[in-house]
Image (cartoon, rainbow, N blue to C red):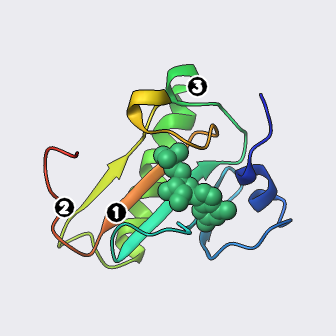
Amino acid sequence: MAETIFSRIIRREIPASIVYEDEHYLAFRDIAPQAPVHVLVIPKEPVRSLAEATDASAVGGLLLVAAAVARQEGIEESGYRVVLNTNGDGGQTVFHLHAHVLGGRPLHWPPG
Ligand code: 5GP
């Protein structure tokens, strides 16, 4: 798949505020936060989007890291939202699978 800015963050070629890392995943603060807590969780092995993901354990692991990040950020009890924008109408702009972890304020539903 085509390289994105997230691959450059993984390789530390551009800076990011990293909040979690393990062998398979990286989590860092969104550059344009939409909530007091707004962290992106990405797999280090790039997949274009959820629509192209085939590895169930990799997607499941992504969600578990999102939950761990929410706990670490102190928003587990107050609540949070995990979002995987997918393709055009889903609002995806970076085509490297990522989960947004949003919290720290009430989140409206449905999203706009
Ligand atoms: P999407 O719209 O694809 O679901 O989300 C992409 C997210 O990546 C956006 O929320 C955007 O603010 C964030 N983003 C784009 N470029 C960068 C960057 O260089 N650094 C960081 N930390 N976030 C970025």
Nearer-N-terminus badge (1/3): 3
Q: Quadrant of residue 48?
A: top right
Q: Determine the quadrant in which ligand 1 lies.
A: bottom right
Residue 29 vs residue 62, the one in the foreground: 29
| Screen quadrant of the C terminus | top left
Nearer-N-terminus badge (1/2): 1
- Rendered position, 20 above or below 65: below
**Residue that label 1 marks:** 102
Residue 8 vs residue 21, the one in the foreground: 8
Percent coordinates x, y for residue 10 in the rendering: 76, 58
Marks 1/2 in contact by CB < 8 Å: the verdict is yes
Marks 1/3 in contact by CB < 8 Å: the verdict is no
- Rendered position, 60 above or below 72: above
Query: In front: mark 1 or mark 3?
Result: 1
**Residue that label 3 marks:** 55
Q: Is residue 102 visible?
A: yes
Q: Residue at x 39, y 59 (%)?
A: 101
| Screen quadrant of the N terminus | top right
Label 2 sits on a secondary structure element that is loop
Looking at the rendered structure, the kind of residue marked 1 is Leu
Q: Residues within 10 Å of mark 2 (few under 14, many from 20)?
A: few
Q: Is residue 27 visible?
A: no
Q: Which residue is drawn at 13% across and 49% down?
A: 109
Residue 89 vs residue 81, the one in the foreground: 89
Looking at the rendered structure, the kind of residue marked 3 is Asp
- Rendered position, 39 above or below 56: below
Residue 107, labelled with which disc?
Answer: 2
CA–CA distance in space, label 2 to label 3: 30 Å
CA–CA distance in space, label 1 to label 3: 24 Å
